[in-house]
Image (cartoon, helix red, strand yellow):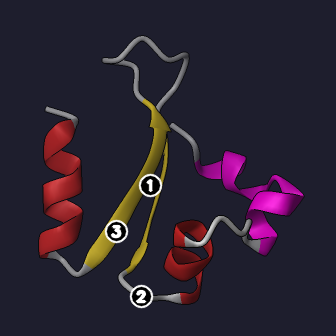
């Protein structure tokens, strides 16, 4: 089921980034979705951390 998230995000013009899911044995689902080719997508593709990642702000939205 979690694999469908990537397809769904893509069909809506987004990109899903995830480090783990409960179904895969992680403690929590850890993800974010951004628009394709947005600043955050490009930073992730080229290995740069976004300002939110550096500040640890993304963790506030983890499920």
**Pointers 3 and 2 in contact (CB under 8 A)?**
no
Q: Looking at the image, which is closer to me, 60 or 46? A: 46
Kindly identify which residue carries mark 3.
15
* In magenta segment, residue 29: no
Q: Position of residue 18 (x, y in %)?
A: 45, 45
Above or below, 8 against 60 in this view is below
- Count residues near mark 3 (Cα–Cα under 10 Å), then give few for <14, some for 14-19, many for 20+: many
Query: What secondary structure is found at the residue carrying circle 3?
Result: strand
Instruction: Decide if residue 55 is on the left or right side of residue 14.
Output: right
Task: Give the numbered dot on residue 55.
Answer: none
Q: Residue at x 69, y 46 (%)?
A: 59
- Count residues near mark 1 (Cα–Cα under 10 Å), then give few for <14, some for 14-19, many for 20+: some
Q: Residue at x 48, y 88 (%)?
A: 38
Highlighted range, magenta: 51-61
**Pointers 3 and 1 in contact (CB under 8 A)?**
yes
Q: Kindly indicate the quadrant of the structure image that contains residue 10.
A: bottom left
Q: Residue at x 14, y 58 (%)?
A: 7
Above or below, 50 against 35 in this view is above
Q: Residue furthest bottom?
A: 38
Instruction: Decide if residue 22 is on the left or right side of residue 50.
Output: left
Task: Give the numbered dot on residue 37.
Answer: 2
Task: Give the numbered dot on residue 17.
Answer: 1
Query: What secondary structure is found at the residue carrying circle 1?
Result: strand
């Amino acid at each position: 089921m979690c694999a469908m998230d990537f397809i769904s995000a893509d069909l809506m013009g987004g990109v899903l980034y995830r480090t783990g899911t409960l179904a895969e044995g992680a403690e929590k689902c850890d993800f974010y979705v951004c628009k394709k080719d947005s600043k955050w997508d490009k930073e992730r593709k080229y290995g740069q951390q976004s300002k939110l990642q550096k500040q640890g702000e993304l963790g506030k939205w983890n499920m």
